[in-house]
Image (cartoon, helix red, strand yellow):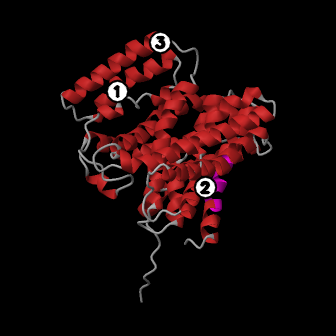
């Protein structure tokens, strides 16, 4: 007699781990344990990994985020229609403005002007984990899920600009930025015009020039592929974020994503390992400022923006109620990956950075809070 309950295969477990960014969680947990068992040895290893992970490897994380933004603006994409994109884009802006203002106001009231620099940390939305929370709350096909994805894409787009402008890595020098970036974009344009299909050429030539331009000009080099990715040949239409049909598309941009999707998950493991190691005693004002601005400020900004947009005559997606919008706003408060990255860009190593990191890590509490609010409002 055979049983229908078969244990999951190794490949199935690996796919589940990769698709749900569990390697990032594993790296984060390992960092937290290591930092609290032997902080000195952890600090030495994390310091050794920092440049390779944050300044080089994370280039590909932000490149994949850029790919989703570019595709969302194509015909059929979530941001292709100004009418369709207006409300979620405004919601994203409100969900960044209110948390930033909340953080800055709290810093002012505490008389801590030295920590105002972290105002952008609670602006972040982790698209992967917010999407996971939304899938756990809303049924398949519910309007809240694509609305959250649109909001998160717009949040990522503005966040990339904020990272470049608000957190230079040193004194900003315009000469290498203009000269090298102009060369990078000219080559990328020429490659696109010549219909070069290999994404490696885009990465190794204009991508390398762009990285050097940002690094030597004082702008964070992790953004190196952001201006290059839009030049890669891509599909004529967008199928949608996380649409499984993208796996069969042969264009350069999708082949780039297919090639780097798994390596980026491994990169995120090392990102968590190199950045999330904080002594659990490192809790202070920046912790609560980041956490409250994400978990409370985000939903206030998102719900308030949707209400204002509706009052101005714009229309949110059908079947998206005010309660749904509140749940989406809470789920968008999971800042995690991008919030951690912003924290490391905002502050030098020390107590303030550790306390801000704790706020970013604790933003995971937004997930059970969103589920609780959804259940309390009879949403399954």
Which of the pair 314/225 is nearer the observer?
314
- Front disc: 3 or 2: 2
Q: Residue 286 has which mark? A: none
Residue at 29% in and 31% down:
231
Residue at mark 1 to residue at mark 3: CA–CA distance: 23 Å
Which quadrant of the view contains residue 264?
top left
Residue that appears at 54% across and 30% down: 163
Viewed as shown, does residue 310 lie left or right of 362?
left
Residue 221 to residue 61: above or below: above
Q: Main secondary structure of the magenta part?
A: helix
Q: Which mark sits nearer the N-terminus, 1 or 3?
A: 3
Q: Position of residue 239 (x, y in %)?
A: 30, 53
Region rendered in magenta? 361-369
Distance CA(mark 1)–CA(mark 2)? 40 Å
Q: Can you tell which quarter of the image residue 15 is in?
A: bottom left
Give me the C-alpha separation between circle 3 and circle 2.
Answer: 40 Å
Name the secondary structure under disc 3: helix
Of residues 57 and 158, which is closer to you in this image? 158
Residue 370: percent from the left, percent from the top? Answer: 61, 61
Q: Residues within 10 Å of mark 2 (few under 14, many from 20)?
A: many
Circle number at residue 204: 1
Disc assigned to residue 330: 2
């Amino acid at each position: 007699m055979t049983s229908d309950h078969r244990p999951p295969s190794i490949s199935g477990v690996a796919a589940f781990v990769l698709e749900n960014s569990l390697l990032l969680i594993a790296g984060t947990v390992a960092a937290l344990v290591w930092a609290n068992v032997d902080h000195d040895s952890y600090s030495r290893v994390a310091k050794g990994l920092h440049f390779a992970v944050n300044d080089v490897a994370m280039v590909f994380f932000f490149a994949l985020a850029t790919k989703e933004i570019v595709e969302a603006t194509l015909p059929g994409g979530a941001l292709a229609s100004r009418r369709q994109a207006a409300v979620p884009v405004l919601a994203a802006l409100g969900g960044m403005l209110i948390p930033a203002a909340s953080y800055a106001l709290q810093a002012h009231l505490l008389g801590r002007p030295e920590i105002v620099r972290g105002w952008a940390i609670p602006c972040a939305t982790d698209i992967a984990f917010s999407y996971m929370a939304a899938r756990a709350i809303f049924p398949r096909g519910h309007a809240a899920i694509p609305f959250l994805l649109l909001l998160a894409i717009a949040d990522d787009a503005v966040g990339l600009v904020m990272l470049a402008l608000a957190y230079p890595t040193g004194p900003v020098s315009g000469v290498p930025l203009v000269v090298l970036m102009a060369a990078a974009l000219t080559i990328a344009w020429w490659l696109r015009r010549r219909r070069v299909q290999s994404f490696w050429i885009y990465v190794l030539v204009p991508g390398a020039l762009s990285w050097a331009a940002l690094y030597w000009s004082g702008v964070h080099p992790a953004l190196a592929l952001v201006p290059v990715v839009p030049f890669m040949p891509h599909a004529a239409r967008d199928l949608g974020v996380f649409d499984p049909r993208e796996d069969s598309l042969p264009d350069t941009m999708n082949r780039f994503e297919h090639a780097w999707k798994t390596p980026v998950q491994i990169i995120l493991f090392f990102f968590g390992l190199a950045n999330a190691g904080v002594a659990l005693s490192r809790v202070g004002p920046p912790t609560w400022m980041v956490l409250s601005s994400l978990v409370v400020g985000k939903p206030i900004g998102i719900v308030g923006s949707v209400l204002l947009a509706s009052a101005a005559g714009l229309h949110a997606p059908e079947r998206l109620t005010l309660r749904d919008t509140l749940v989406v706003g809470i789920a968008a408060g999971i800042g995690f990956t991008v919030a951690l990255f912003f924290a490391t860009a905002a502050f030098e190593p020390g107590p303030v950075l550790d306390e801000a990191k704790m706020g970013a890590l604790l933003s995971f509490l937004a997930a059970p809070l969103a589920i609780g609010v959804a259940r309390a409002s009879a949403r399954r």
